[in-house]
Structures are given as C-alpha cells and as structure tokens.
Amino acid sequence: MNASFDFSGRTLLLTGAAGGIGRCIAELFHRSGANLVLGDRDEAALETLAEDMDGARIAMLAGDAADPDDAQRLVDLAVSRFGGIDYLIPGAGVYPAQPFAQMSDDEWRRTLAVNLDGVFYICRRAQPHLRPGGALVFLTSLAPHRGALTNAHYAAAKGAVGALMRSLTRELAPDIRCNAIAPGIIDTPMIGDFKKTRSDETLKLTPLARLGLPEEVASVAAFLASDAASFVSGETIQVNGGLYMVA
Ligand SMILES: NC(=O)c1ccc[n+]([C@@H]2O[C@H](COP(=O)([O-])OP(=O)(O)OC[C@H]3O[C@@H](n4cnc5c(N)ncnc54)[C@H](O)[C@@H]3O)[C@@H](O)[C@H]2O)c1
C-alpha cells in the first residue's frame, strides 16, 4: 500500500505498537516523518520494531497498558523527548475468547482493565500535553456494533471506548479532533483462535470475501490523524470489507 502523509515534526504516542495493527501504524507514521513514542508490554518485539525502522525519531517503553503508572511513564517520555504529543492512538488490546456462561469475574476485569481502563489512563495523562491541531484515533471494533460471540467483555469495553471517544470529541474541541476506527476481522496475531474456528463462516458473509490487512487499518488511522480529515470529529469508520452492512 502506498498511502502517503506528511507528519513531519509531529509526534505520535501509540500503545500496542508491537502488535499487527500497531506495527503498521508505527511504520506508516514514521515513513511520513512523525516522531514515535511506542508502548507495548512485549519489550523484545518493540526493540525489533525500532531496529526495523532505524532508531531515529523513536522512543519506546515496555509497560502494561492497564497500569496507570506505566501510562504516566510513557507520557513523560513523549514530553521529555519530543516536547508534547500531536497524535494519540491507544491501540493496546486483548481479545480473549470466553463464552459468557463460563466467564469469571477476573476475566471480565482483566479484559476491561486493558481495553477500557488503559485507554482512559493514557488519554487522561496525555491530555495536558496534546498540542492544538492534534488528533486522537481510537481502535474500537465491529464487536459492539454486531454483538460478539464469546467475547462479551471485549465488546463491552470497545463499546465504552466509542462512548469515551464521543465525549472527548466534545470536551477536547476545538483544539483536538477525536475519531475511532471499528475494524472487522483483520489478519493479525489477535485473531489466531478466531481463524481456527469461525473464519470461514465470516468470510462467506463478507462482501469483499477476505480478511482485512493491518495496513488497511493503519492507512485509515493516518487519514483520521491527518489534515485530510480536518473537519472529521466524533466519527467511527468501519473497516470490515462490508461485513457490518450485511451481517
Ligand atoms: N485484529 C482484529 O481483527 C481487530 C479487530 C477489531 C479491533 N482490533 C483492535 O485493534 C487493536 C490492535 O489489535 P491487533 O489486531 O494489532 O492485535 P495484536 O494482538 O496483534 O496486538 C495487540 C498488541 O497489544 C499489546 N498488548 C496487549 N495487552 C497489553 C497490555 N496490557 N499492555 C501493553 N500492551 C499490551 C500486545 O503485546 C500486542 O503487541 C486492539 O485494540 C484490538 O482490540 C483488532
């Protein structure tokens, strides 16, 4: 994919940076001139990612998105290295498959801790350092729109992130725009279990008849952050090959 943007002199803070979608977002923004502040719990994968892009304009820190102190450390790093934050994409997420009838309180809490509390922690701590003209891009999901099978906690968390996005759209305006991407089924490590069990059935329903690629989410994230989307705020873009429309 040849999407091109100009983020020269701008700084992106991205969590979940070592994941399938995160890595593509990091590469696209870096190629487009941005400084990167990357967070993920997987330190080795973060280091590999930074090596692949040559270390210039990159700061990174391993940590747990569900830990408010780690969120603060990541924001402090962005401020000390690059003086502030232009774009924030809280992408860290987990997608455990658990039928509701067997879901424990701990499984519920952990899924919300990463996918919802973690988004709050990083947004709240980044907020004083967001530069005017900046943008937040949230990664929600098709799950809260369609209802999830075996992922009720995930769908609940992602639905709440959509609500948080709409509230921040109002509270951070007019200096900062907020939008979300609701990916459908994107071919990354996150959907390993899903591919084994339910992928065929989903592909039959999907008009574009294939899984999405992480690059196809990254390009929409870059569009939403860029000046090309300068009058887009409070929006959720579905990236799912048409599955939402027909399912
Ligand atoms: N792949 C899909 O089909 C899909 C669909 C809808 C939404 N999403 C969302 O997109 C985002 C990226 O997903 P992906 O497909 O790249 O998944 P992925 O599993 O490839 O990447 C997720 C990344 O988040 C990191 N992470 C997980 N828990 C963490 C924690 N507690 N602290 C710090 N880092 C943590 C992982 O180490 C990993 O690098 C997630 O928020 C996910 O929910 C993905």
Image (cartoon, rainbow, N blue to C red):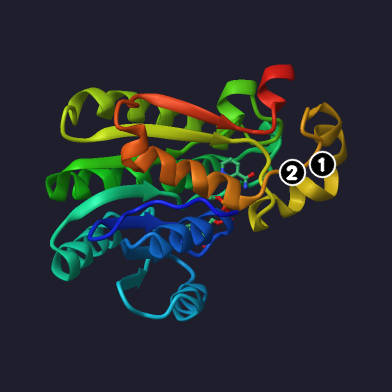
Picture quadrant of residue 107: top right
Say which quadrant the N terminus sits in. Answer: bottom right
Single out the mark in the foreground, 1 or 2: 2
Q: Is residue 45 left or right of residue 55?
A: right
Q: Is residue 114 left or right of residue 208?
A: left
Picture quadrant of residue 136: top left
When the figure is inspected, residue 15 is found, relative to residue 206, above or below; the finding is below
Q: Which mark is residue 207?
A: none
The percent position of residue 27, horizontal first and vertical second, equals 47, 63
Q: Which mark is residue 211?
A: 2
Query: Could you tell me which secondary element the residue under label 1 belongs to?
Result: helix
Query: Could you tell me which secondary element the residue under label 2 belongs to?
Result: loop
Which residue reaches farthest top?
A: 246
Per the model, the C-alpha gap separating discs 1 and 2 is 9 Å
Disc 1 CB within 8 Å of nearest ligand 1 atom: no
The percent position of residue 104, horizontal first and vertical second, equals 59, 41
When the figure is inspected, residue 221 is found, relative to residue 239, above or below; the finding is below
The percent position of residue 184, horizontal first and vertical second, equals 64, 36
The percent position of residue 174, horizontal first and vertical second, equals 16, 28
Disc 2 CB within 8 Å of nearest ligand 1 atom: yes
Q: Amino acid at mark 2?
A: Leu
Query: Label 1 belongs to which residue?
Result: 199
Q: Name which of mark 1 and mark 2 comes first in the sequence.
A: 1
Total number of numbered discs in the rendering = 2
Identify the residue at horizontal 32%, vertical 78% (top origin).
56
Label 1 close to label 2 by CB (< 8 Å): yes
Residue nearest the observer in this picture, 100 or 217: 217
Q: Residues within 10 Å of mark 2 (few under 14, many from 20)?
A: some
Q: Amino acid at mark 1?
A: Ser
Identify the residue at horizontal 51%, vertical 50% (top origin).
3
Q: Is residue 10 left or right of residue 228?
A: left
